[in-house]
Image: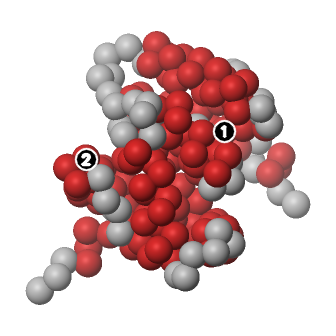
Amino acid sequence: MFDYAKYYDMENYLFGEVSPRYGSRETLSTFDFFCIVIWKANRSKSKVASRLLGKKHRDLDAAVRALVQDIAKAPDPKARLEALIDKWRFRLPMASAILTVLYPNEFTVYDVRVCNTLGDFEDAQHKTNFQTLWQRYVQYTETVKNAVPGKQSLREKDRYLWGKSFATQLKNDIAESFRTTRR
């Protein structure tokens, strides 16, 4: 019997199964690609599907194959991110999430919560010149690496900083009885 429970903890599925599978074969199924999209921003899955189909591929499978081929043939991390940003028109948060799953030792997820914790880099996602965006992303990644001593991997550091942002925000919301977040 197939164990559907493995999808309950999406991060564990992505980094425990999808990432190693991609690392050994440099292929990614459409299902697994959209698992990454949903993990980063569930609300974006339809928009991402439309963007992929807008590239004139016959279906999502063909589009994902072409996208993965562009990533896999890119000679270095910069070229991988550039393919997703310039050719496939992803924004930095989603592009970095995709690449973090596929290349977890080279990329970290660009996330506004982490930017808030670091007190910088919120501007990176709005850069329209790729070279400038790349420079800011490299600075962001280096800052993440240096911000959390004692954690080994980029993913562990990213999770720590995200968790710190979450906990800080929740504590502040409770202290204010959620008054600042009411509409």
Q: At 60% from the left edge and 39% from the top edge, which residue is drawn?
A: 82
**Amino acid identity at mark 1:** Val
Q: Which residue is mark 2?
A: 23
Residue 106 appears in the picture as rendered = yes
Q: At 52% from the left edge and 24% from the top edge, which residue is drawn?
A: 141
Whether 142 is drawn above or below 76: the answer is above
Along the viewing direction, whichever of 63 and 158 lies nearer the viewer? 63
Q: Residue 1 placed where, x, y %? A: 11, 86
Q: Residue 61 placed where, x, y %? A: 44, 76
Of tags 1 and 2, which is closer to the observer? 2
Q: Residue furthest bottom?
A: 1
Residue 8 picture quarter: bottom left
Q: At 20% from the left edge and 49% from the top edge, which residue is drawn?
A: 24
Q: Residue 135 placed where, x, y %? A: 64, 21
Count of labels in the image? 2
Q: Secondary structure at mark 1?
A: helix
Q: CA distance from mark 1 to mark 2?
A: 28 Å
Whether 35 is drawn above or below 129: the answer is below
Residue 165 appears in the picture as rendered = no
Q: Secondary structure at mark 2?
A: helix
**Amino acid identity at mark 2:** Gly
Earlier along the polypeptide chain: callout 1 or callout 2? 2
Judge the density around disc 2: few (<14), some (14-19), many (≥20) Cα neighbours within 10 Å.
some
Which numbered marker is on residue 168?
A: none
